[in-house]
Amino acid sequence: MAEQKDVIVVGAGPVGMLTALALAQTGASVTVLEQEPHIINSPRAAVYFPSTLVILDELGLLDELNAIGFQNRTFGTHVPEFGYSSIVTTDPIDGIPYDYQLHAGQHDVARVAMEHAQKLGVEVLFEHEVAAFEDGPDGVTVTVKTAAGEKTLAAKWLIGADGARSTVRKLAGIEFAGYTWPERFVATNVKFDFRQLGYCQANFVCDPDDMAIIAQLDREGLWRCTYLEDASLPLETYEERIHQRYKHFMQGRADYELVSSSPYMLHQRAGETLRKGHVLLTGDAAHATNPCGGLGLTSGVWSGMVLADILGAVLRGEEDESILDRYSDERRRIFWEIVTPAATENKRMLQERDPAQRRKDLEAVKALSDDPDSGAMLMLFAYKVIGDLLRPASRWKDADPTPRVDLDIAGRQHQIH
């Protein structure tokens, strides 16, 4: 019989590796399984809000990631139809130690987290594909496919952090309830200085036909340009359409270098439960949102941290297993009540077709831009995905600077929870 670990985490993306590291820091023995041969560098999330910097700092990663990525304090909204652009600059807020967003590739975050986790004894096994598992009274037995054939691993708990198409979730028979949007996102990494065209280091472009999310990725001139296209268009020819779309985004310039691209469907879905027996879900395997506004990564990472915290307490005998059902209920609530409405409204505004509504949206953007507190609110909104940390003794007890009170900014009340 294989040695039983405390936890097997499936998926070596940022959520999986951060969760594994957090668990290891609680004293748990952890194995991470990843079916790819290495950490994948595909265009995905790249901006980490202050609410996530809390995590990176607490885990001991922030200084290293600040050296790899860069700090950004501006956000631009552009409405080409009306010739309008605005810039919101984040400002320091009392009680919050970060007045910036960190731009860094998610592969860098996963890699740095993996290196720290391995120093604590976390075993990371690449080219290990989960084929099946059995959940028994004392834990889970997992069958994996490897180049050398099948083998069996055992753990008290199994965590699926393997993305929206999660094998763990499917094998557990957990329904992924919700809906899929009729468009697909195409995320591209490109060497091109968008600042020459009036863009900030992070931007929304609101246009019914050519919406985009544009952000600088590193200090070497790599940028992310993500746009929507009709999902009925052939997936196999999406690359042929990139350069046509670039003619619009680059305003006819051709002095760019396309580095990589990745098409993906947009979901608003969550598992009907995030805990079934000894099987737990987190990240996109638990809840997947459209990425407009960056709340998918933020909520996914926080789900992983809350889970690591309370599962560590369960393993040490400090909490009853029933707290894991509370985890499921609370993270599903956060997803449906906070993440989904915000991301859906962002997506609507980016691609709104009704002329009258577009003008209303423009006025709302102007009002936000003129509000002296807009930078503070931009920073604070992402704290809403933290939700209930579940344990009074949580390592994250000081993570939320606005614990269930209304925040008073310039004499006005803004409800954060």
Image (spheres, rainbow, N blue to C red):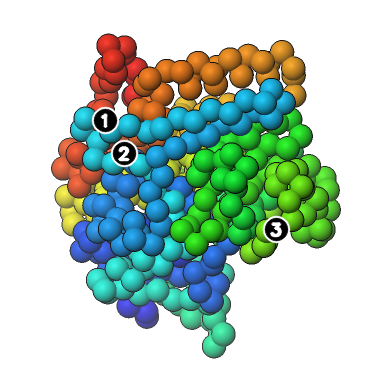
> Which percent across, then down, holds residue 225?
63, 49
Q: Is residue 100 visible?
A: yes
Amino acid at pointer 2? Asp
In which quadrant of the rendered image does the N terminus lie? Answer: bottom left
Residue at left 41%, top 67%? 111
Image disc number at residue 255: 3
Q: How far apart are labels 1 and 3 at the CA level?
A: 40 Å
Q: Nearer the viewer, residue 265 or 280?
A: 265
How many badges with numbers are in the image? 3
Which secondary structure lies at badge 2?
loop
Q: Residue at x 61, y 59 (%)?
A: 191
Q: Disc 2 or disc 3, which is closer to the eye?
A: 3
Amino acid type at mark 3: Asp
Which residue is rendered at x = 44% and y = 51% of the image?
A: 103
Residue situated in front as seen by the camera: 382 or 105:
105
Whether label 1 touches label 3, CB < 8 Å? no
- Residue 264 at x, y = what percent? 66, 51
Residue at numbered disc 2? 99
Mark 3 secondary-structure assignment: loop
Circle 1 sits on which residue? 93
